[in-house]
Image (cartoon, grey):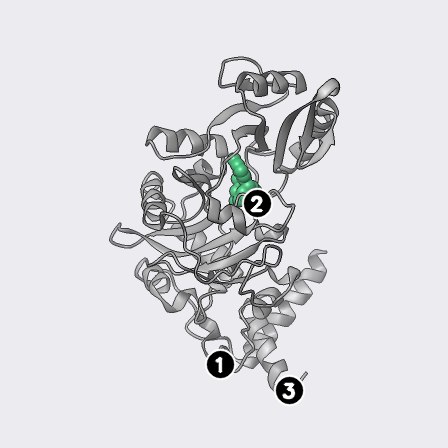
Amino acid sequence: MTIKRLIRDVRLLGSGFKREEIETYSLNHDDIFPHAHQFLSHVVNKSIVRPKINAFRQSCLLEDKLALSALLFSANISCPRIWGYFHPIYGYSCFGSELKCARDLKELILKASMDRVVLKPRGGRLGRNIYVIDRLLEGERGECYRVNGTEVDLVEFIESLTITPYGDYTDAYDGWIVQEYVQQEESLSELNPSSLNTIRVITFRGHNDEIFIVGAALRVGRLGSYIDNMDKGGVAVSIDSHSGQCGVGKFKAQYGSEVLTSHPDSGILFSGLSVPEWAEVCRICVRAASLVPTVRSIGWDVGCTPSGPTIIEANSEWGLISIQRHIGTGLLSGVYGEELRRLGICLPEALDTFPVALLKYIFHKLHAVVVR
Ligand SMILES: Nc1ncnc2c1ncn2[C@@H]1O[C@H](COP(=O)(O)OP(=O)(O)O)[C@@H](O)[C@H]1O
Ligand SMILES: [Mg+2]
C-alpha cells in the first residue's frame, strides 16, 4: 500500500466511513477522493441525519408489516393481500378463524385457494426468514408442502419457527404474516424467475412539503433464490429516476465488486430494460409517503405485476448502498444534500484532516477494545 493511499484510508476511516463503504464507492480512487465528503456515510446517516428527519413513532407503522398493509389498504394503494397473522397464541386469519399452528395454516391455504403463500416475520428486515410455502398434490402421496423449494413436514417446520426466529424480533413485532405471493410482470420474471424482483424507490419530503423521488434501483435475485435482497446476494441495478431506464448492476461488497452489465445467471442485459409503468411506480410511492409525513425519507420495495405496481414493504432505515453506489458524486452533492441542509442538518463540508482523522480512528479502535 502506498503512503498516499494509507493517508487517504486514515482520513476516510477517521471521518466515519467503513471499509465496505470505501470499497463500494471507490472513495480511495483519484477521481472520487476529492469529493468523498459528499457521500453520506452510514455513521452520519444513523447518528445525525435519520434521527432528525424520521420520527420514531410513524416509523413503527412502516416496520410493522401488518400495520403498513392496513394503512395502504385504507388509502386504496395496492399491496399484497394479507391472509392472516400467524402467532402461537394470538394468531388469526382474514376469515376469522385461528392461525396458531400448522393445521390452521393448512386450512387457511385451502380456504384461500392458494397453492403458494409467503410467510414472513411481522417486523422482519434484510431478507431474513422469508418463506415461500407451496402446497402440492402428488398423486397417491396426496398433499405435500415445500418451503423455499424443499419438501418439508409442515408441522415440524412450523414448530421450528416458534423457537428461533421469534428470538430475533422479541421486543416489538412478535409473530408472522401470511401474505399473498406476488406474481411479477414478464420482463422482470425473465431476469430471474425464482425471486420477486422489486424496485427500491426512495422518497423524500422536502422542506416545502413536496414529496419527490431521490433515487431508485432494481433489485434482482440469483437463480434459485426466492428473494432479491442485496444482503442475500441479490444484484442492485441503477435506475434513471426520470425515465425508469436501467443501467448497470452491482452486488453488495461481500458478494463481489465487479460492475455487471447483465444478470449473472440469465445473461439478460440490463441496459435497454425499463421499469414497467415507471410513472405509476413513482406515483404510488409518493402517495404512500404522504400517509406517514413525519418520516421524511423512506425506501419502498415495489413489485411490478401484470396489473400494475404493488407495494411489498417500506423501510425508514433504508440501506444507502444500493442507491448511493450508482451516484458517482455521492448523495450529499445533489438535491438530497441540499434538502437536508435546508432542514437545518449540519453535514460534513470536508473530510477530517489527517491528524484529526488519525486521532479519531485510534480513539474508535480503543473504544471498541474497551467495550469488548
Ligand atoms: N408477497 C410476496 N410475494 C413474492 N415475493 C415476496 C413477497 N414478499 C416478499 N417477497 C420477496 O422477499 C423479499 C424480501 O421481502 P420484504 O417484505 O421486503 O422483507 P425484508 O424486510 O426482509 O426486506 C422481497 O424483496 C421479495 O423479493
Ligand atoms: Mg425489503
In the displayed structure, would residue 171 be above or below residue 204?
Answer: above
In the image, farthest residue toward the left: 208
Q: Residue furthest top?
A: 97
Q: Is residue 90 visible?
A: no
Per the image, the residue denoted by label 3 is 3
Residue at label 1?
31
Q: Which residue is mark 2?
A: 193
Residue extending farthest front = 139
User: Is label 1 in a helix, a strand or a loop?
Assistant: loop
Point 48% across, 30% down: residue: 66
Question: Dot 3: few (<14), some (14–19), or many (≥20) neighbours within 10 Å?
Answer: few
* Mark 1 or 3, closer to the camera: 1
Residue type (three-letter) at the residue carrying disc 1? Asp
Q: Residue furthest bottom?
A: 3
Which label belongs to residue 19? none
Cα separation, mark 2 vs mark 3, equals: 48 Å
Image side of residue 212 versus residue 259, left or right? left
277 vs 366, left or right, is: left
Q: Marks 1/3: CA distance?
A: 18 Å
- Of residues 356 and 89, the one drawn nearer to the viewer in this rendering: 89
Amino acid type shown at disc 2: Pro
Marks 2 and 1, how far apart at CA: 38 Å
Q: Is the residue under label 3 in contact with that under label 1 (CB below 8 Å)?
A: no
Left or right, 349 with respect to 119, comes to left
Q: Between disc 1 and disc 3, whose residue precedes?
A: 3
Say what secondary structure mark 3 lies in: helix
